[in-house]
Image (cartoon, rainbow, N blue to C red):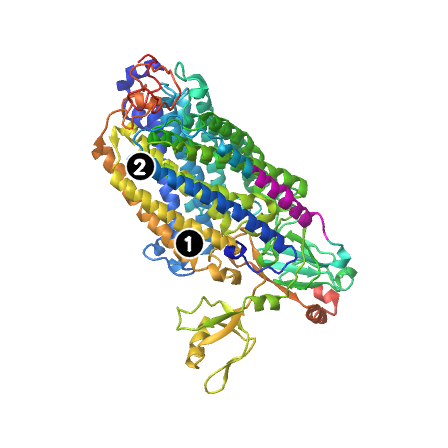
Amino acid sequence: MEGNHSHDHDLGFWRKYIFSQDHKVIGIQYGFTSLLFLLFGFGLMIVMRWQLAYPGQPIPFIGTWFGEDRAPEGIMLPEFYNQLGAMHGTIMVFLGVVPLAVGAFGNYIVPLQIGAPDMAFPKLNMSSYWVYFVGGVTMLASFLMPGGAANSGWTSYPPLSVIATTGQTFWLIGMVFLITSSLLGSVNFIVTIIQLRAKGLTFMRLPFFVWAQFVTSFLLLLAFPPLEAAGVLQLMDRLAGSSFFMPSGLVVTGQALNVSGGGSPLLWQHLFWFLAHPEVYVLILPAMGIVGEIIANNTRKPLWGYKSMVYAVIFLGFMSFIVWAHHMFMTGMGTIISTFFQTTTMIISIPSIVILTALFISLWGGSIRFTTPMLFALAFLPMFGIGGLTGLPLGLSATDIPLHDTYYVIGHFHYVVAPGTIFALFAGIYYWFPKMTGRKMNEVLGRIHFFGSLVCMNAIFMPMFIVGLAGVSRRLWDGGAQYAHAQPVLHWNEFMSMGAWTLGIFQIPFIMNIFWSIWKGKKVEENHWEATTLEWAAPSPPPHGNFLTTPEVYRAPYEYSVPGHKKDFIPQNQPMEA
Amino acid sequence: MKELLHLPLDGSAHGLAIDNMLAAIHWLMLILFLGWGAFFIYTLIRFRKKKNPVANYAGVKSHLSSYLEIAVAVFEAVLLIGFAVPLWAKRVNEFPAEKDATIVRVVAEQYSWNIHYPGADGIFGRTSISLITDDNPLGLDRTDPNAKDDIATVNQMHVPVNKPVIVRLSSKDVIHSFGVPTMRVKQDAIPGQVIPLWFTPTLTTDQLVAEMAEQFQLKPEGTSPKLFEYIALKDFIAKDSTVVLKKGDVFSQDVVKSLLDAGVTQVLAAPNVTTEIACAQLCGLGHYRMRGYLSVDTKEAYDAWMADQVSQLPQDPVAAVK
């Protein structure tokens, strides 16, 4: 692999930029694709929020674009609303956040941070991206099917999903591609991190971000296969007449359903959540990793409790496999099983608190610079805090009774993923942009993006707790307007929608900033943030093969403000005597 | 705290325990959030670059955070062992004796709730999917002797107050969820399974309505309180002494103007329906309108309702099948 960069110039345009095997090009491909999907998934929500704020009123401006079978005269049909809901969830999680956190940041940053010239298996890496791409296109294409896209929620519970329109078949095929892509990627990350670390880079000297990606890869490797199997089984139920998830005696709209029967709808839920709970940590661990890097850099001091954070991440990884059924308390669960899952759920909250506390305490004694990446990283802490804390009443089965499947749940996981993970991902973009381009993103636009997004995110998600506590179910086409018990909180729907639309406006400076900075941004030197980790020892942007000289590591990852040293940072690759 | 959470009214025997636990958890959340938040903001101000140009390599030396983490773990353990597990055990293990309870079958379907009472004999009649028609959504076999006195309704569930209710829940097609916010119960209705749930209503629907009564200041359309369907709780008489709205009348936003025209500016009213059965699991395009009504009646009112239902039973069981 060392020799790769010598024939860098031999590659034509297609091999260099499209079917590239270079982890950095693949990382950027993942980055742009997933950002486009995030924007698209957010767009679906922008449209849904109109219907929630003003149920049954024609969507302005774009309402007539959707066609008569989706929104006649611009009024959104419930079946279209359900498609948008299912696809918003699917796209944001599987096509947006995970590919951005793991595919983009993992691919671009991990090899650089461990001092490797590339990933261990460059061809596997390339195929991982293209399999993801095909999965994404399949998902998008499902909107054009008769009956539209999948409409049974991102959880696709059978029997509803099995009797759903053709879009669900595309959803399942798309998922099989996406899972395959994740599996290829995760194997690659594990091997790369174990085998290709620079000389001297022991596990306890790994940047926290690499640890987070390492554990994430194991989650992807071990949790995704059950859903891939489940996806194939559901595909068989839909296409081949099997009944893995279909019980006997189903009657749909008065007609006995012609299925062989004998299956169990709950089996799907177990297989789905066996993936989907670790998936939550796939969403959150890389975010914690990014925040850790940025906090160490911008406080100019080592992360407090680095070791305890590493152990906590490993423990989180293990525990995330045995909490899944807390999503299923309302399926008729007995005391023993529910006690087990409540106990594991309470236990898993402890390492999360350890990591969050360590990040908070890391700030103490720092010399804090409020750069744009730091602002996003700082906001992650209380926002993820709210998301974590509101998980408590949901994780205990008794208090889950009034809250299950209400807007409280929506508020809870959006705090984890939106102002939580997505803020961390924004932070990562602002932080590593100079490495990827050699230029810096604009700070003024960055601040507008940050403060606008922070206010809007809270305006959207905080009222959801109020609405949920009032008992309003999620996934209602009219936002609860049918229900008397929803009346006292119904006015929040309009407020939340305003928040969502304004959030959209505040993404414009971000999009402008990316494109403007790629070509016109201020040129900066290779270690712009005066950081310690190895990626900053490579040129910006790093050439094919990454480092000009093979780096060697002599110390822990965050040696900032070491007493008696005249500079306030010592790079990991700086020899001891220097 | 419980007031701050603005939970729905509670008309069940076990609801208070759940509400209290919710309040305790929200106290914990609030204290942790404010504690962290105060530390966070103080730290950001005190250690900003301008104020503190040189960072301290070692950082915090104390082990306070470990004690804090242990305290949170202990609090969670207390919540779990002391409250969550016993409460749950009571919901799913300690069912009341069937003879002391009102027993109802609820069969969910897209998008309604089929309610099935066993009738005077206390035995549910045979049902079969081959008998399901628009008029017989349960597929009840009226030729079965046990089925002759069975009562079936759609979306209308009546139960007597202060007597435990056992619901045997199932579904004909997809997964639904039987959620009654005012009774603090929620249970998925899963096809192929019959799952029991129980609760004891302690307030009648009328009592709940009275608790929700509000004095409304009427204003021209658009600025009035969010009127859904409300029940007038007393007579409202116009200046010319005609009765505009009688006690018990249901009214909504569209009559506000006529009330105003008549000179009525204030009404005492309550939401028309307080005890709703809300589907809580996405079940298809009509999920949003899968609403049933649970009416908790006094024993006398319940008996009267039941007698009325019985009087409507088909006299010729064989004809009823057709």
Apparent side of residue A301 relative to residue B2 in the rendered image (left or right): left
Q: Start and end of the magenta stretch?
A: B73-95
Q: Is residue A563 visible?
A: yes
What type is the residue that disc 1 sits on? Arg
Q: Quadrant of residue B85?
A: top right
- In the picture as drawn, the residue positioned furthest to the top comes out as A577
Q: Residue A133: x and y, percent?
A: 39, 34
Which chain letter matches label 1? A
Quadrant location of the N terminus of chain A in the rendered image = top left
Q: Badge 2, how many Cα within 10 Å: few under 14, some, many 20+?
A: some
**Residue depicted at 32% across the width and 25% down the height:** A531
Q: Position of residue A345 (x, y in %)?
A: 57, 38
Residue A429's spot in the image, x, y percent?
Answer: 33, 34
Q: Which mark is residue A370?
A: 2
Callout 2 secondary element? loop
Q: Chain of mark 2?
A: A
Residue position for label 1: A70
Q: Residue at x 66, y 62 (%)?
A: B202
